[in-house]
Amino acid sequence: MQVQLERVLEQVLARNPGEREFHQAVTEVFESLGPVLERNPQYVDAAVLERLCEPERQIIFRVPWVDDHGQVRINRGFRVEFNSALGPYKGGLRFHPSVYLGIVKFLGFEQVFKNSLTGMPIGGGKGGSDFDPRGRSAGEVMRFCQSFMTELYRHIGEYTDVPAGDIGVGGREIGWLFGQYKRITNRYESGVITGKGVTWGGSLVRTEATGYGTVLFAERMLATRGLSFDGMRVAVSGSGNVAIHAIEKAQALGGHVVACSDSLGYVVDEAGIDLEVLRQVREVERLPVAEYATRRGGGAHYVPSARVWQVDAQVALPCATQNELDETDAKRLVESGLLALAEGANMPLTPEAVALLQSAGVLYAPGKAANAGGVATSALEMQQNASRDAWSFEHTEERLAGIMARIHDNCAETAEEYGDPGNYVLGANITGFTKVADAMLALGVV
Ligand code: NDP
Ligand code: 2IT
């Protein structure tokens, strides 16, 4: 079976040259699948692996817009509709200058397994643009969103493909994207996009869901060793949507969060991160995280051009971007007493860093399991839109907590069933894969 996997992997790498992150994501999943194929030769006969790695549809388009000085600008837009065996394509949009097809495909591929793990009826997709929102006025970002949707609108729909946010796309951008969709189509189709404002079709808890869910997953994982967040020293990377809500939930559970970061550097605050100040700086004023240290005065300090993993921590929550924690960082964290790491971001660890944590016996939760609370709550938003209902915060958070607990337990049980207890990578990949593969078999060669 190993030979089969290697043959398909070789094909995938050759057919998608230069897409480094996509190669990384596929390789990581394939490394878990040997024993599943042994038990289920029907997957091999039906070429499930080959089909899974070939997106159902890939859309690349020009996004022209005019900046505040009247200059015409051109960006590239993407939507990769990866797999719809379990439901409409579902996944976020990322606006960041590093975005190219390989990033969108890695994210779309991960999304297929993540969405399967949620237990909700959603397929996988991802999109975005190499547009850089940094330093752009609100007017420029709005015109960009409108131009982006002017092409994207013809590809999406409640039953077809349902985008949401990701890096660089938050509630503000979802509003402008949905506004343009509504204007072009003349339809108030709430279910076409998620992450909407709560007064116009959004769901309570969606904003918080990814960060909260990551911490809830970590909490359950810690509990398998009789541990909890209470009194734990926590380091978080990033200071965007996922990071801020991970900090909030970790603190609510008694964790002592001492550090967070952005792409320019990190801040350490031994008294514990003051969320009110962090939110004011990052969400309201949209300033770099360095400003947090300035406002906190003597208590906090800022370290420019360095990774937050220099800070000692018992629990690490990477919530920024892919490959932001490498083998050297992992080694240092283990030496500093790391007990657990849960990925709020997508693929934030290099493969070498993952291997190091696993061999050191650190509890490790891969993003496709740990950060699935965001997209799961998007599916709850779709449910509310379909029934023209709006649930309370408490009810929705309870649903999220139930989903995270189930994902954790399913991954843990599968890992045990396959003879490697505590290996959440194996558990997540096999559980996510099996459900999609079975649906693909049932739907025939399509
Ligand atoms: P935001 O745009 O809100 O925040 C991103 C944060 O990460 C910022 O602090 C940003 O710093 C930092 N960052 C971005 N790119 C880099 C980089 N190349 N190097 C270092 N730091 C970087 O995004 P989200 O919080 O929504 O997303 C964070 C991660 O979580 C991503 O991996 C995303 O795919 C993942 N995720 C998001 C979900 C969601 O619901 N939003 C759901 C599941 C996963 P700066 O401002 O300086 O760029
Ligand atoms: O990576 C992710 O799961 C997201 N950015 C959220 C996707 C969604 O559709 O809510």
Image (cartoon, rainbow, N blue to C red):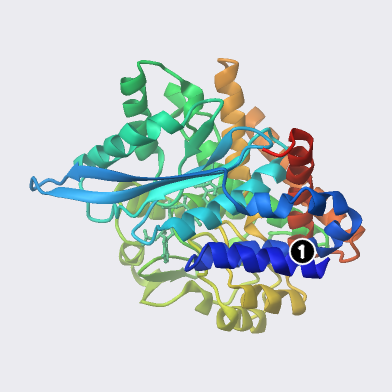
Q: Is residue 124 above or below residue 186?
A: below
Q: Position of residue 333 (x, y in %)?
A: 61, 78
Residue 34 placement: quadrant: bottom right
User: Quadrant for ligand 2?
Assistant: top right
- Residue annotated with mark 1: 32
Residue 417 vertical placement versus 263 (above, below): above
Q: Residue at x 45, y 53 (%)?
A: 275
Q: Which of the two residues, 43 or 262, is positioned nearer the viewer here?
A: 43
* Left or right of 13, for residue 44: right
Answer whether residue 231 is visible to the viewer in this image: no
Q: Secondary structure at mark 1?
A: helix
Taking 151 as reference, is 416 left or right? Answer: right
Q: Position of residue 25 (x, y in %)?
A: 61, 62
Can you say whether 91 is above or below 354 in the image?
A: above
| Up-down relation of residue 66 to residue 19 (above or below) | above
Choose top left, top right, bottom left or bottom right for residue 250: bottom right
> Split into 4 quadrants, where in the image is the C terminus?
top right
Which residue is more in the foreground, 33 or 142?
33
Q: Amino acid at mark 1?
A: Ser
Relative image position of residue 319 (x, y in whole percent): 52, 59
Mark 1: few/some/many CA within 10 Å (<14, 14-19, 20+): some
Q: Residue at x 74, y 59 (%)?
A: 228
- Nearest the camera: 131 or 23? 23
- Tell me the quadrant of the picture where the N terminus can be found: bottom right
Left or right relative to 74: residue 108: right
Q: Position of residue 78 (x, y in %)?
A: 41, 47
